[in-house]
Amino acid sequence: MLLEKINEDLKDAMRAKDTLKTDTIRMFKSALNYYQIEKQLKEVSDEDALMVLQKQAKQRKEAIAGFESGGRTEAAEKEKKELAILENYLPKQASLEEVKKIIMDSIAEVGAMNKKDFGKVMKAVTGKLKGQADGKVISQIVNEELGKKEQV
């Protein structure tokens, strides 16, 4: 379903002569092909495509930060436009409050008491928030919440 939408959007972008969108989607499809070869998959699922899409979006975010800190605003703007195109295919991002609630529910669910249970909590949370929140943000909040439990 996701791949079909991406292929349709690629055709539309090519017809509209939208070079930025065409190039961005082609870069994504190229990364997806590399992933398929690397993992020796016969077919790529929507879940695989979503994972590669998230990785591509993360790379754009890192590039934007690098270009901005280096004073290369033109390059940063191009990366921002590419990121916006990729984000159209990503699931809606959960709000910070939603993420915290899911983390607190997961901590209670797995019975986490201290930072030693970090892995258990992360596994539970990432399963629920797949693609809806940045892993760094999740990790940071889980660490903070488990740290609070240790102090009590």
Image (spheres, rainbow, N blue to C red):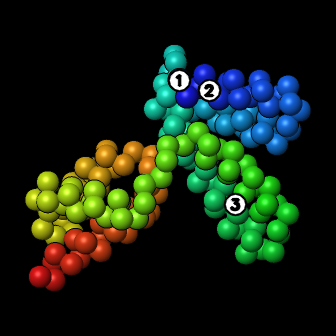
Measure the alpha-carbon separation of dots 3 and 2.
26 Å
- Mark 3 vs 2, N-terminal side: 2
Q: Quadrant of residue 19?
A: top right
Classify residue 22 by image quadrant. top right
Judging by the rendered image, the residue that carries numbered circle 1 is 1
Q: Residue 105: where, in percent of width, then height? A: 20, 57
Q: Which mark is residue 5?
A: 2
Which residue is at the front of the view, 42 or 123?
Answer: 123
* Of labels 1 and 3, the one closer to you: 1
Check disc 3 and report its element: helix, strand or loop: helix
Q: Residue at x 69, y 45 (%)?
A: 85
Instruction: Kindly give the residue lying farthest to the top in the view shown.
Output: 42
Q: Residue pushed farthest right?
A: 17
51 in relation to 84, above or below: above
- Residue 18 appearing in the image: yes
Relative to 4, say whether 67 is above or below. Answer: below
Which of pointers 3 and 2 indicates the residue nearer the eye?
2
Can you give x and y, in whole percent of width and height, for residue 89 in the image?
59, 39
Estimate the spatial distance between the alpha carbons at disc 1 and disc 2, rounded to whole Å: 6 Å
Location of residue 152 with respect to 98 vertically, above or below? below
Q: Amino acid at mark 2?
A: Lys
- Where residue 102 appears, as percent x and y from the top left, is 28, 56
Query: Disc 1, disc 2: CB below 8 Å?
Result: yes
Three-letter code, disc 3: Ala
Q: Residues within 10 Å of mark 3 (few under 14, many from 20)?
A: some
Res 63 label: 3
Q: Taking 54 as reference, is 112 left or right? A: left
Residue 119: image tag = none
Q: Amino acid at mark 1?
A: Met
Q: Residue at x 39, y 45 (%)?
A: 130
Q: Is residue 72 left or right of residue 145?
A: right
Residue 34 visible to the viewer: no
